[in-house]
Image: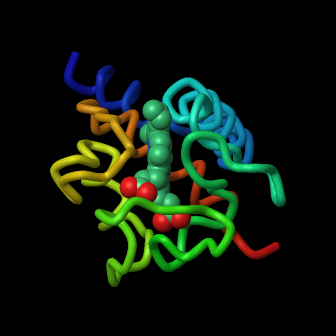
Amino acid sequence: MVLASALILFAAPLARSPAVAQEADLEAAKKQFLTSCGVCHTVEPGAPPRQGPNLHGVYGRKAASLPEFTYSDALKGVDWTWDDATLDPWIENAQSVRPGTVMNYRQADPAKRKLIIAYLKSLSAKP
Ligand code: HEC
């Protein structure tokens, strides 16, 4: 019994090749982004902002740094770059990170936040 379940644990990750797994994960990540953030954010390079700024290349970008977007006073002038450490609490509860921000959004599920961040990261990845 113990041996059988050990085999299942080892066999499962081998069932999909890493490349296929990554693509599937990215597809899921994109879906999650569109569901959670797409109403307010575009991601195509050069696409106009919606309620929030265009997020193409936001991973690794200095916060509140797009000249064409009018940020709230709450976000204007903050001194950080968007990465795993700053995006996670922001998506979890933007208002608690910067009280008064006009982004009214909360995502309590860490797995969904992880997917969304992975998608944003993929948009910034250098080819
Ligand atoms: C209801 C609309 C809305 C939703 C939904 C929303 N946002 Fe926002 N977002 C905004 C607005 C508005 C701002 C500008 C905030 C400000 O100026 O205070 C913003 C700002 C941001 C910024 C800062 C960008 C920069 O240039 O510094 C990031 C990052 C961000 N949002 C990520 C997300 C992600 C990821 C999601 C989905 C999990 C999401 N947002 C969902 C409206 C939204």
From the viewer's perspective, is 2 left or right of 105?
A: left
Task: Identify the image quadrant of the N terminus.
Answer: top left
For the point 61% across and 33% down, the residue is: 38
- The image position of residue 60, as x and y in percent, is 53, 76
Q: Between residue 33 and residue 102, name the one nearer to us.
A: 102
**Quadrant location of residue 98?**
bottom left
Is residue 49 visible to the viewer in this orientation of the structure?
Answer: yes
From the viewer's perspective, is 13 left or right of 112?
A: right
For the point 63% across and 28% down, the residue is: 31
**Quadrant location of residue 7?**
top left
For the point 54% across and 29% down, the residue is: 32
**Quadrant location of residue 29?**
top right
Q: Between residue 39 and residue 3, name the one nearer to us.
A: 39
Q: Between residue 14 and residue 96, name the one nearer to us.
A: 96
Is residue 115 visible to the viewer in this orientation of the structure?
Answer: no
Task: Identify the image quadrant of the C terminus.
Answer: bottom right
Residue 40 versus residue 95 in the image, above or below: above
- The image position of residue 17, as x and y in percent, is 69, 42
- The image position of residue 48, as x and y in percent, is 77, 50
